[in-house]
Image (cartoon, rainbow, N blue to C red):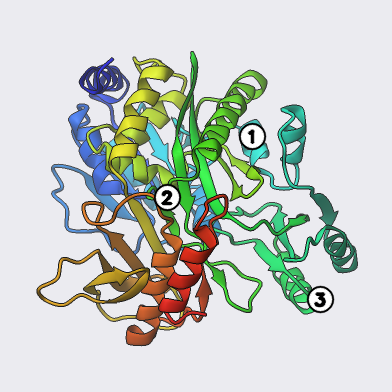
């Protein structure tokens, strides 16, 4: 089936799900894009409940926009606040809902994290079943690797006992330290509850952060290599598997913390690792479908190491890195395909046709969403400048130069937000993006006072020149 046929079949089927319905968008990202997609499917005026403090200037005939004012500095904070709103809406919000949807027959689409099945009596189409949420627990995922006979790094799960955690760390340390990954009631996303531990002082600091938030911690050796993720999409007839995505996670030099800085599809792991990742993702998808009736997107995360791909976790939701595929095929409403699949609808195309279409597009058109929160300063207004890279060092672009990217600093609830917009028409595919982010963030520290401090990119392995290329790039950027 050609891309045009896939697009036509998906739109036709999604129109029967959403067309002529009252649709509430409760939280989420890329909301203007979602509104446009719903409009194209026949939704006349969606109600948008944004977590932000202020509504954008928006045509009220296109969408009704209400600001909830619950945006948080962390995903976990915002998620908790949103679930509280969905579970117990205020009288004022109920009045808005009843005015928009007086019959109570409307449909609700919320964020990929939400596990609330209804909102004021209206079904949340993409809510996560409890048995799906349970699969994200970082401290129990090893049972899945064992069930599938998947090679993986050794790990132990320890309760919140600092001495026991340190003892486990000394046993598992291969010379580069260990990684603690906590889990419990709060969301462990964006490396919130992940720490690298190399000595007793770092262990004490990590314990102080994790103890109030987590019930237990998984301890595993620190794995050298590129953090990567591969998405699977579970359909009724099988699992579509997409291309690997680099998780841009620089290390804070001399610190136990990582900096989660988004994702990008420029990096091409060695062919054997790509195949290994995709084959495992298909097996995981079929296991999820058979064991808990899973539908929709999941992510399989891990590290591309010299020993191959070693998985670390599964996230049973529409991952943030799906933006790479949305950008590769902007005409396909991929987030709404996810909603329809989770809700149990037939979307009109097979898993293989869906896979072939997205895989070809994403391999041909690379993209990234590279950004990080800034705590050191609160900019009063957005500022941006074009930049160029020279073997992964970064400087401002001259007026006559074609820039490789745009570096942008803008206000945000936590203080500021630094974004790096890479130009896919200029940057060649193949290399990891993390060293580019490290160099650009160093420039922002120097020129704008963003205060990230020294960062180190992950080192690619399994390639003949990987170590040397990254070392030269890091030294050229003045980072090491």
**In the image, is residue 295 above or below residue 162?**
above
Q: Is residue 375 left or right of residue 399?
A: right
Q: Mark 3 highlights which residue?
A: 200
Identify which residue is drawn at 26% across, 50% down. 65
Sequence order check, earlier mark of 2 and 3: 3
Spatial CA span between label 3 and label 1: 37 Å
Where residue 377 appears, as percent x and y from the top left, is 40, 83
Q: Secondary structure at mark 2?
A: loop
Label 1 neighbour load within 10 Å: few <14, some 14-19, many 20+ = few
Q: Can residue 416 be seen from the camera position used here?
A: no
The quarter of the rendered structure image containing the N terminus is: top left
| Residue identified by numbered label 1 | 130
Would residue 249 be found to the left or right of residue 57 on screen? right
**Badges 3 and 1: C-beta atoms under 8 Å apart?**
no
Q: Nearer the viewer, residue 463 or 441?
A: 463
Badge 3: residue crowd in 10 Å (few <14, some 14–19, many ≥20): some
Q: Which mark is residue 267?
A: 2
Where residue 458 appears, as percent x and y from the top left, is 54, 62
Classify residue 391 by image quadrant: bottom left
Q: Horizontal and vertical percent for residue 109?
A: 39, 37
Secondary structure at numbered mark 1: helix
* Gap between marks 1 and 2 measured at Cα: 34 Å
Asked where in the image residue 410 lies, by quadrant, the reply is bottom left
Look at the picture and state if 465 lies above or below 27.
below
Separation (CA) of disc 2 from disc 3: 35 Å
Mark 1 and mark 2 lie on one chain; the one further toward the N terminus is: 1
Between tags 1 and 2, which lies in front?
Answer: 2
């Amino acid at each position: 089936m050609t891309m045009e046929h896939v697009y036509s079949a998906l739109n036709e089927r999604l129109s029967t799900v959403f067309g002529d319905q009252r649709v509430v968008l409760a939280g989420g990202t890329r909301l203007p894009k979602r509104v446009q997609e719903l409009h194209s499917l026949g939704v006349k005026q969606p109600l948008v409940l944004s977590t932000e403090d202020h509504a954008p200037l928006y045509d009220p005939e296109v969408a009704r926009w209400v600001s909830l004012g619950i945006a948080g500095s962390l995903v976990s904070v915002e998620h908790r606040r949103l679930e509280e709103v969905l579970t117990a809406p205020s009288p004022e919000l109920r009045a808005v809902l009843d005015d928009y949807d007086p019959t109570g027959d409307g449909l609700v689409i919320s964020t990929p994290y939400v596990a609330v099945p209804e909102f004021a009596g209206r079904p949340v189409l993409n809510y996560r079943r409890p048995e799906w949420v349970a699969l994200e627990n970082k401290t129990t995922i090893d049972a899945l690797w064992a069930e599938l006979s998947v090679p993986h790094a050794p790990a132990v799960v320890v309760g919140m006992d600092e001495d026991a955690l340190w003892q486990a760390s000394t046993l598992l340390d291969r010379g580069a330290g260990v990684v603690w990954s906590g889990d419990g009631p709060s969301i462990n996303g964006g490396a919130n509850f992940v720490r690298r531990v190399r000595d007793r002082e770092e262990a004490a600091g990590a314990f102080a952060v994790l103890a109030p938030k987590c019930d237990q911690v998984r301890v595993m050796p620190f794995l050298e290599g590129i953090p990567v993720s591969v998405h699977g999409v579970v359909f009724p007839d099988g699992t579509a598997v997409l291309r690997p995505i680099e998780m841009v996670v620089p290390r804070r030099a001399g610190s136990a913390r990582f900096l989660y800085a988004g994702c990008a599809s420029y990096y091409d792991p060695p062919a054997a690792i790509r195949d290994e990742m995709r084959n495992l993702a298909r097996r995981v998808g079929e296991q999820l479908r058979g064991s808990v009736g899973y539908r929709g997107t999941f992510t399989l995360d891990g590290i591309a190491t010299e020993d191959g791909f070693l998985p670390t976790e599964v996230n049973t939701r529409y991952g943030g890195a799906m933006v790479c595929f949305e950008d590769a095929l902007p005409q396909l409403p991929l987030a709404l395909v996810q909603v329809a699949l989770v809700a149990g609808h037939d979307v009109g195309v097979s898993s293989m046709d869906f896979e072939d279409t997205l895989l070809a597009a994403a391999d041909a058109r690379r993209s990234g969403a590279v950004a990080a929160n800034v705590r050191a300063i609160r900019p009063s207004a957005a500022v941006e400048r074009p930049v160029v890279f020279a073997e992964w060092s970064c400087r401002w672009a001259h007026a006559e130069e074609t820039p490789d990217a745009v570096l942008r600093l803008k206000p945000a609830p936590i203080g500021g937000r630094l974004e790096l917009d890479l130009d896919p028409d200029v940057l060649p595919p193949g290399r990891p993006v993390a060293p580019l982010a490290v160099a650009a963030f160093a420039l922002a520290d120097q020129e704008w006072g963003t205060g990230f401090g020294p960062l180190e990119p992950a080192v690619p392995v399994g390639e003949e020149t990987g170590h040397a290329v990254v070392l030269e790039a890091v030294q050229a950027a003045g980072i090491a």
